[in-house]
């Protein structure tokens, strides 16, 4: 049986590799990894032809075979059916759904029919496996969850400006290799059934990206894992995409890398960020390889926790101990790899994330940005903020809204020290005018600019032209006694009230009701008579909310009348 599995897996591998590339662009929400076991057991148990799929076989595969062989019932319950759907769509769209198969629509209908029963079977497996007991699932060496508490306690991490990060990303040797490989692939290179490229093509590809031909007695394609990592990176970066039929093609704008626009550069670099996993050691034994899975991420998180730098030998000792603790094969895997840190460091240097000087390994600014994104992707809190000198006024206002008052004050003070008061006022009010619906940003900006006194007069005068800022500008200019400044009107006052109600509503129902009760029923009633006329972005939303939550039925009724008037006049 083992030989049959190996033969079937070998037959499937090229097709699954193409599917993974196809899914990247056409079914990004599916998990291609979940297709492998289903496709393999379909080949072993139901059809010698990889492209022949029948409704009955699909049902038997999912309800009879998969419950016996699935390794992760939880992941299968969530993602196997969408993944199989994507795979069948891929077969149909690329002409691989063989004649004699049921139609794609019929196969998809079968997936719908078995969904509830399949999920129930997976849940039964979870129960049988003791899901919910006291045993905790152990992650790999790159499991950030194990460091969640330490990450939360880190001092504020300051991220560098996008212009600086983009300049570093443009220098990434690995991205340049991925570009060159994609350009070599061209507009429609046919890929093989057993391996993506022939040995001759592999040798050409190696020359293209500056890698030597390996000494091997077997197929060259099986001895160049680094080349396939570059290939996969090109797919991640969207430099390569599946073409028609059995082909793969370069994306039109690939030759333009490094792009001129900083945002485009960073967007592309972030697409390839998860390629850090390609730095993990690859050994001849799959079990030993898995024992060192996540090593590259483990290196990165340890650098971040250490403030950015560690001695290489210390990292090696710590990771070796972690590997031995996590997996009974960890020690053997570490020894078999020789120097497991070497491929990890090589990949991270190539992606611009670390630098090595002597025996010291350090995160680059680009690397720090990348690790923070990976930590955030893992839903783990870390206090990372733009560098004060590169923080825009809008970034400052948005960040400060989420900070405790003393921390927000410190951020404002540090930011202000880098600017003349007149310039600071102008930038803050310009940021507040960007989005008329963002009352919190507007109130924050007005509050800070209000502390700048006469230095802010030119900025306030300019803000009079902005409908959302005019109430604040008129109020502050009046308070400063500026000659010729307009007096605040009743409409201005009503706008300020709507802004405060908007912020209060954002804090929750109880906070909103409390703020209404604080000003008294008579005043609320009076405001409802006139406030519906104000062209505020949230006036209808607020009137609707008052009608739903206010405990006084008369006020709720008045709010409904006002809402009707507001909608009728819109």
Image: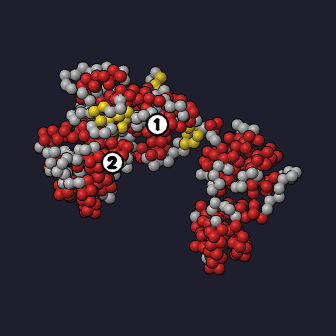
User: How far apart in space, not on screen, are marks 2 and 1 (Cα)?
Assistant: 21 Å
Give left or right: position of 116 versus 429: left
Which one is closest to the eye, mark 2 or mark 1? 1
Q: Position of residue 6 (x, y in %)?
A: 16, 39
Q: Quadrant of residue 190?
A: top left
Residue drawn at x 75%, y 63% as measured from the top left = 491
Can residue 117 be seen by looking at this rendering? yes
The answer to whether 393 is drawn above or below residue 341 in the figure is below
Q: Position of residue 241 (x, y in %)?
A: 36, 37
Give left or right: position of 56 versus 469: left
Residue at the spot of label 1 = 268
Q: Nearer the viewer, residue 277 or 475?
A: 475
Q: Tell me, for residue 549, which label it has, or none.
A: none
Residue drawn at x 28%, y 39% as measured from the top left = 245
In the rendered image, which quarter contains the N terminus? Answer: top left
In the rendered image, which quarter contains the C terminus? Answer: bottom right
Cβ atoms at labels 2 and 1 below 8 Å apart:
no
Residue drawn at x 47%, y 45% as measured from the top left = 376
Helix, strand or loop at mark 2: loop
Helix, strand or loop at mark 1: helix
Q: Nearer the viewer, residue 431 or 106?
A: 106
Q: Tell me, for residue 31, which label it has, or none.
A: 2
- CA neighbours of label 1 inside 10 A, class few (<14), some (14 to 19), many (20+): some
């Amino acid at each position: 049986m083992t030989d049959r599995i190996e033969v079937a897996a070998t037959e499937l591998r090229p097709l699954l590799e193409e599917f993974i590339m196809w899914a990247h662009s056409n079914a990004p929400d599916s998990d291609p990894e979940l297709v492998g076991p289903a496709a393999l057991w379909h080949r072993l148990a139901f059809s010698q032809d990889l492209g022949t799929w029948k409704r009955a076989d699909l049902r038997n595969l999912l309800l009879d075979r998969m419950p016996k062989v699935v390794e992760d019932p939880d992941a299968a319950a969530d993602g196997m059916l969408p993944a199989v759907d994507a795979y069948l769509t891929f077969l149909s769209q690329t002409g691989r759904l063989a004649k004699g198969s049921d139609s794609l629509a019929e196969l998809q209908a079968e997936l719908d029919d078995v969904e509830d029963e399949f999920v129930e079977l997976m849940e039964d497996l979870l129960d049988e496996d003791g899901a919910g007991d006291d045993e905790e699932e152990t992650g790999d060496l790159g499991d950030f969850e194990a460091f969640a508490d330490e990450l939360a306690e880190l001092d504020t991490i300051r991220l560098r400006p996008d212009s600086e990060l983009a300049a570093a990303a443009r220098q990434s040797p690995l991205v340049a290799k991925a570009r060159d490989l994609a350009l070599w692939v061209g507009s429609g290179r046919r890929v093989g059934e057993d391996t993506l490229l022939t040995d001759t093509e592999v040798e050409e590809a190696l020359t293209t990206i500056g890698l030597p031909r390996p000494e091997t007695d077997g197929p060259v394609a099986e001895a160049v894992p680094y080349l396939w990592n570059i290939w996969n990176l090109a797919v991640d970066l969207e430099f390569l995409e599946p073409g028609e039929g059995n082909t793969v093609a370069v994306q039109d704008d690939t030759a333009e890398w490094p792009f001129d626009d900083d945002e485009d550069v960073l967007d592309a670099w972030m697409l390839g960020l998860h390629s850090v996993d390609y730095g993990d050691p690859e050994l001849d034994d799959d079990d030993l390889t898995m024992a060192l899975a996540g090593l590259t991420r483990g290196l990165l998180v340890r650098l971040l926790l250490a403030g950015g730098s560690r001695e290489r030998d210390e990292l090696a000792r710590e990771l070796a101990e972690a590997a031995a603790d996590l997996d009974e094969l960890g020690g053997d895997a570490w020894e078999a790899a020789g120097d497991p840190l070497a491929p990890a460091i090589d990949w991270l240097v190539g992606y611009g994330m670390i630098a090595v000087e002597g025996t010291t390994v350090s995160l680059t600014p680009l690397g720090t940005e990348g690790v923070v994104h990976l930590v955030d992707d893992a839903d783990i809190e870390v206090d990372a903020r733009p560098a004060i000198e590169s923080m825009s006024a809008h970034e400052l206002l948005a960040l400060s809204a989420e900070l405790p008052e003393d921390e927000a004050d410190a951020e404002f003070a540090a930011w202000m020290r880098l600017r003349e008061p007149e310039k600071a006022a102008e930038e803050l009010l310009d940021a507040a005018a960007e989005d008329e619906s963002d009352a919190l940003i507007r109130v924050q900006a007005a509050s800070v600019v209000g502390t700048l006194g006469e230095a802010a007069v030119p900025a306030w005068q300019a803000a009079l032209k902005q409908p959302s800022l005019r109430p604040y500008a008129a109020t502050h200019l009046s308070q400063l006694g500026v000659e010729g400044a307009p007096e605040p009107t009743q409409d201005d006052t009503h706008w300020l009230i709507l802004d405060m109600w908007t912020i209060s509503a954002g804090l929750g129902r109880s906070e909103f009701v409390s703020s209404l009760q604080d000003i008294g029923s008579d005043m609320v009633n009076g405001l409802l008579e006139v406030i519906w006329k104000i062209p505020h972005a949230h006036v209808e939303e607020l009137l609707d909310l008052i009608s739903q939550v206010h405990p006084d039925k008369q006020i709720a009724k008045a709010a409904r009348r006002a809402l009707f008037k507001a909608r009728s006049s819109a």
